[in-house]
Amino acid sequence: MSKDYDGLSEAELYKLFYDIIRDIPAGKVASYGQIALLADRPRDGRYVGHALHAVTDPSIPWQRVVMASGEIAARSNPGERERQQKLLKQEGVEFIADFQVDMQRCGWQKMPPDLFG
């Protein structure tokens, strides 16, 4: 049985996140929480992480999603953190520490649509 996320199936929820993640340009990063907010699901940042863990489609730039602090999240698979760092550096993303992106320079500035004008 598929999980229900407030009326969405897991596949529908993940697709919602993936569509937003595809919009992050090369050289920029977004946070898990920002993706959730843009999907109008502000409390679901952890599900963004679950969706990224499940990525199999190479068109989804999963590497462009980091923690709000800019840090690359630790992974259960050895070497994945280093792989993400390498992919981001290849795109020109600047780091201020070993696994921490410079969010001031490389943070994606897309915000949710303004419903009031």
Image (tube, grey):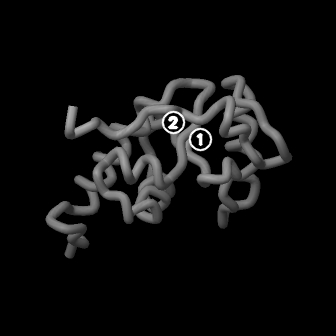
Please state if 56 lies on the left or on the right of 76 as rendered.
left
In x, y percent, where is residue 80? 69, 52
The numbered disc on residue 61 is 2
Asked if the residues shown at circle 1 and circle 2 are in contact, with their CB atoms under 8 angstroms apart, the answer is yes
Front-most of residues 3 and 43: 43
The three-letter amino acid code for the residue at tag 1 is Gln
Q: Residue at x 36, y 58 (%)?
A: 42
Q: Residue at x 67, y 53 (%)?
A: 69
Front-most of residues 7 and 59: 7
In x, y percent, where is residue 100? 76, 47
Regarding mark 1 in the picture, which secondary structure is present there?
helix
* Residue placed furthest toward the front: 116
Task: Kindly indicate the quadrant of the structure image that contains residue 13.
Answer: bottom left
Q: Residue at x 55, y 45 (%)?
A: 65
Q: Residue at x 50, y 57 (%)?
A: 53
Q: Quadrant of the C terminus?
A: top left
Identify residue for label 1. 63
Question: Pointer 2: residues within 10 angstroms few (<14), some, or many (20+)?
Answer: many
